[in-house]
Image (spheres, helix red, strand yellow):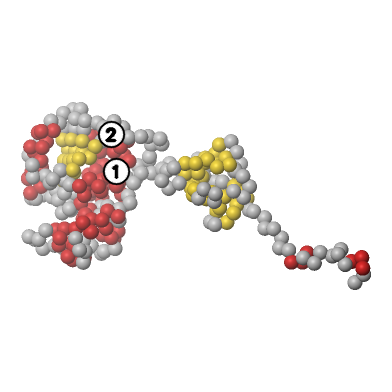
């Protein structure tokens, strides 16, 4: 090697790894990315001047600058860019299957009401129809069964601007419930029911990973019989499992869906 080459050659030149280019990605609506500095993860829902608007799974929104290498997409650093054209986000659909009203808050409660038999019924109705009922201003109130329904209806005092819808379990011909409901005759009250012994049974069994709801012998409390057949310790444990299996109207049987839609239409006319 000549004396002049002693320091002229870069001995590390061959060892250098070329810097990887950061990919650019169109920030399409609904694309899910993360801001690594804050840890905020959300879907693209819109744009502001030089920035993108992200919405997380709880509905919270934040604005982030469209800076180079500022986001993570599936764990990879990317540069987001605003697309030349952006498509409008698809309308949000509620758990009941209806189109959500953008920006709508809860309406002041109507005088009209929907009654259900108990707390489990109320929780299931809220899980599926809660968004719709809040927009319509309809309050759902649980009863303690329907044995005293005619007296409760008279005390409520239904009228043209004060309608009452009642959801009844096991409303089938010849049942005790059918005989009680026959005594409710006000034109401002609509009673709608389903054929299931309890609201639990209106949940599709496949959602709970069972082929069918157990048959409980007459004379035995139905919920306790179901728990015994399925090996569940208590009705409270079983109820948590039932409610957790319901996300929207697809998870319950059609008679319940039809009855609830009728009741909502009736009290909001």
Q: In the image, what residue occupies the spot 24% across and 37% down? A: 139
Residue 187 numbered mark, or none: none
Secondary structure beneath disc 1?
A: helix
Residue beneath label 1, please?
Answer: 129
Q: Secondary structure at mark 2?
A: loop
Label 2, on which residue?
137
Q: Is residue 116 visible?
A: yes
Q: Is residue 161 left or right of residue 100?
A: left
Q: CA distance from mark 2 to mark 1?
A: 12 Å
| Residue 40 position within the rendered picture, expressed as x and y whole percent measured from the top left | 49, 48
Residue 193 visible in the current orientation: no
Residue at the image point whose x is 22% and y is 45% from the top? 122
Image quadrant where residue 14 sits: bottom right
Local packing at callout 2 (Cα closer than 10 Å; few below 14, some 14-19, many 20+) is some
Which quarter of the rendered picture does the C terminus lie within?
top left
Q: Is residue 253 above or below residue 259?
A: below
Q: Residue 235, how many percent across, how many down?
A: 19, 58
Residue 260 in percent (x, y) is at 24, 43
Position of the N terminus, as image quadrant, is bottom right
């Amino acid at each position: 090697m000549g004396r002049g080459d002693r320091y002229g050659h870069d001995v590390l030149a061959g060892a250098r790894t070329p810097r990887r280019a950061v990919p650019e990605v169109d920030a399409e609506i609904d694309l899910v990315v993360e801001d690594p500095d804050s840890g905020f993860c959300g879907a693209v829902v819109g744009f502001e001047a030089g920035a993108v608007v992200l919405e997380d799974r709880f509905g919270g929104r934040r604005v982030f600058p469209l800076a180079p290498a500022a986001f993570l997409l599936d764990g990879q650093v990317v540069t987001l860019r605003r697309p030349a054209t952006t498509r409008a986000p698809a309308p949000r659909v509620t758990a009941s299957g209806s189109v959500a009203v953008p920006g709508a808050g809860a309406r002041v409660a109507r005088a009209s009401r929907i009654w259900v038999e108990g707390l489990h019924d109320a929780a299931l109705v809220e899980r599926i129809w809660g968004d719709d009922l809040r927009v319509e201003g309809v309050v759902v109130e649980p009863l303690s069964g329907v044995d005293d329904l005619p007296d409760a209806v008279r005390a409520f005092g239904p009228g043209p601007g004060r309608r009452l819808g009642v959801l009844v379990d096991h409303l089938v011909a010849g049942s005790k419930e059918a005989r009680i409901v026959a005594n409710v005759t006000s034109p401002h009250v609509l009673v709608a029911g389903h054929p299931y012994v309890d609201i639990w049974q209106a949940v599709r069994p496949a959602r709970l990973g069972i082929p069918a709801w157990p048959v409980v012998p007459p004379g035995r409390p139905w919920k306790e019989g179901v728990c015994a057949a399925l090996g569940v310790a208590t009705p409270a444990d079983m109820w948590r499992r039932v409610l957790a299996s319901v996300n929207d109207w697809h998870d319950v049987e059609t008679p319940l869906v039809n009855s609830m839609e009728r009741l909502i239409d009736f009290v909001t006319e």
